[in-house]
Image (spheres, rainbow, N blue to C red):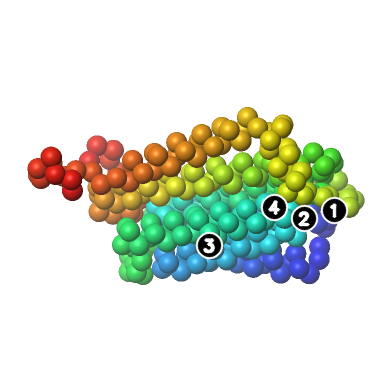
Amino acid sequence: MTPLQGCLLVSALLFAIGFAGAVTRRHAIIALVGIELMLNAANLNFIAFWRYGAHPEALTGVMFVIFSIALAAAEAAVGLALIIAIYRHYKTSNLDEVKELKG
Amino acid sequence: MSLPFLIIAFMTVFAAAAAMSLRNLVHCALAFVVAFAGLAAMYLQLDAQFVGFAQILVYVGAIAILIVFAILLTRSGDTPNKAVLAPGWVCGIAVSAVVFTLLGWAVLNSSALPEQTPPAPVATVKDIGGLLMTKYVLPLEIIGLLLTAAMIGAVIIALKEPSPTENSGRKT
């Protein structure tokens, strides 16, 4: 197994774990963390292909990951603000109990 | 496949699995920090130093604190005594297992992946900064605009909504 395949396998495992967490957990914050984990698995793929692929001097993978980290920061801020607003309205952050949009 | 890579990979995957399966949310957040620190170590091992340190700054520094604050503000810091998994959790686990099996099969059997390991590329901060100011200056501006909009939006969303029973002129 080459190092690239090792990185890709770790990334696939992280993606699967994040997906399982985002789908199965009841709490909204953990679902958000699962989505962050899936995003990071994609970032690891970018870095692995940049490191072991052709033309690493173009720095394309690094640039993509930098922008992706900035996007993830914005996403986490808005997502957690939404969770806090939902908690204030429904007095719960359990995803199963938040069923209607017009409370 | 070197020994440091194996150690970092095992630590990252174990911490991620713990973050997704522990019952107490504060423990989840701490395991999440370990997982992202492990990912940063993996970036450092793949010769992407700038990305590794950016990962530590953004994830371990900012997002983890944000998550802990959200956990404490929604008063979910203590261990729940109800079930923490949604009703259809078997389906979710099965789908994610299928996803991992497919991805792993594709990775191990692909003929498109390069076989040989190239020498370590150099990605100095000077190169990255130069590219950010020349070729990628438009995405940089857009990301700046997006971060500003997201910050203002997050503040507005999380603002306390005025309760209808109280006097509307008073700040609540």
**Chain at tag 2:** B
Q: Is residue B58 left or right of residue B9?
A: left
Circles 1 and 3, Cβ within 8 Å, touching? The answer is: no
Instruction: Work out how far the residue at label 1 is from the one at label 4, CA to CA, in angstroms.
Output: 15 Å
Q: Which-is-in-front pick, marks 2 and 3?
A: 2
Chain designation of label 4: B
SS class of the residue under badge 4?
Answer: helix
Closer to us: B47 or A44: B47
Question: Which amino acid type is shown beneath numbered disc 1?
Answer: Ala
**Residue A7 position within the rendered picture, expressed as x and y whole percent measured from the top left:** 73, 55
Circle 2/circle 3 CB separation < 8 Å: no
The chain letter under disc 1 is B
* Cα distance in 3D space between marks 4 and 2: 9 Å
Of mark 2 and mark 3, the one earlier in the sequence is 3
Checking the image for residue B81, the label placed there is none
| Residue that carries the numbered disc 4 in the rendered image | B50
Numbered badge on residue B32: 3
User: Are the residues flagged by discs 1 and 3 from a single subunit?
Assistant: yes
Whether residue B92 is visible here, answered yes or no, is no
State the image quarter where residue B15 is shown. Answer: bottom right
